[in-house]
Image: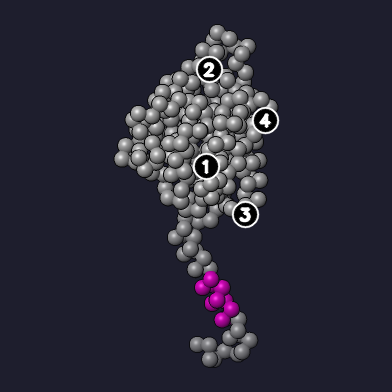
Amino acid sequence: MLAGLSPARRRLVVAVLALVTAAVVAVGVLLATGGTDAEGPGPQARPGPVLLVPGYGGGTTSLRALADRLQQAGRDATVVPLPGDGRGDLGEAAAALDDAARAALARTGEESVDVVGYSAGGVIARLWVADGGAGVARRVVTLGSPHHGTGLADLAGRIAPESCPEGCRQLASDSPVLARLNAGDETPDGVGWVSVWTTLDRTVTPPDSARLDGALNLAVQEVCADSRVGHGQLPGDPLVQAIVLEQLGPEDPVALGTADCARLGG
């Protein structure tokens, strides 16, 4: 067919065919990978930097040991400072997490971040995901987080409201913040969700307030039945640290049981 065309027309036809072929290949790649929407979730197979979010009050000391353990394992790990005294609006804390995520991606050149939220930090991580963080979140691991509120905040709001600032009120079981997060899908698609908690928690009450529908829910005592770790010891406990490292690996989150206790150092 091309032999009967002039050289100029022949070059034009070849160029058009090349463009059509490239377009067909591109469409095939998009269909095979589910698209490349920049707002979609980060790639699950490639771990990026880890951001650790403190709990109510904003103290970072309890997360330093976990950050060190992650760094020893070769991960880029940063503890995110919360605005003010860490007792204010959890939405502002989520904005600080967003800033930290953008900075980590710019610094490392990676496409996604992992987040570990301790106590109220897990709620902050969920707020961040709900408000746009899903575009860069690969995995979210929460440690003893009051996803459905805690009786301590309920009690403080009733008998000593002057000692229960905004962040405290937002952790009450009937708070509008938690109602929004828990309405419908508690674990939006595209992010790997893991909730680790202890049955001996006396700060998040009841302890299974930490459960998230659609997440891998893992009580420490389901791995090592004799673990005595409490709420305050979660980030620094060697067994919990090993569990976190396991769940932040390149593979999908994996259920653990008593057969894994010795392997994880429990």
* Point 35% across, 33% down: residue: 224
Q: Which residue is mark 4?
A: 83
Q: CA distance from mark 1 to mark 2?
A: 31 Å
SS label for mark 2 = helix
Q: CA distance from mark 4 to mark 1?
A: 25 Å
Q: Nearer the viewer, mark 1 or mark 2?
A: 1
Task: State which tag comes first along the sequence, 4 or 3.
Answer: 4
3 within the magenta span: no
18 within the magenta span: yes
Q: Which residue is mark 3?
A: 109
Where 139 sits versus 219, above or below?
A: below
Q: CA distance from mark 2 to mark 3?
A: 40 Å
Report the magenta stretch's main SS.
Answer: helix
Q: CA distance from mark 2 to mark 4?
A: 20 Å
Q: Which residue is mark 1?
A: 69
Q: Which residue is mark 2?
A: 153
Mark 1 Cα within 10 Å, few/some/many (few <14, many 20+)? some
Mark 4 Cα within 10 Å, few/some/many (few <14, many 20+)? some
In the image, taking residue 179 as reference, residue 86 lies left or right, namely: right
Where 129 sits versus 197, above or below?
A: below
Specify the segment rendered in magenta. 13-22
Task: State which tag comes first along the sequence, 4 or 1.
Answer: 1
Query: Residue 108: image x %, image y %?
Result: 62, 52
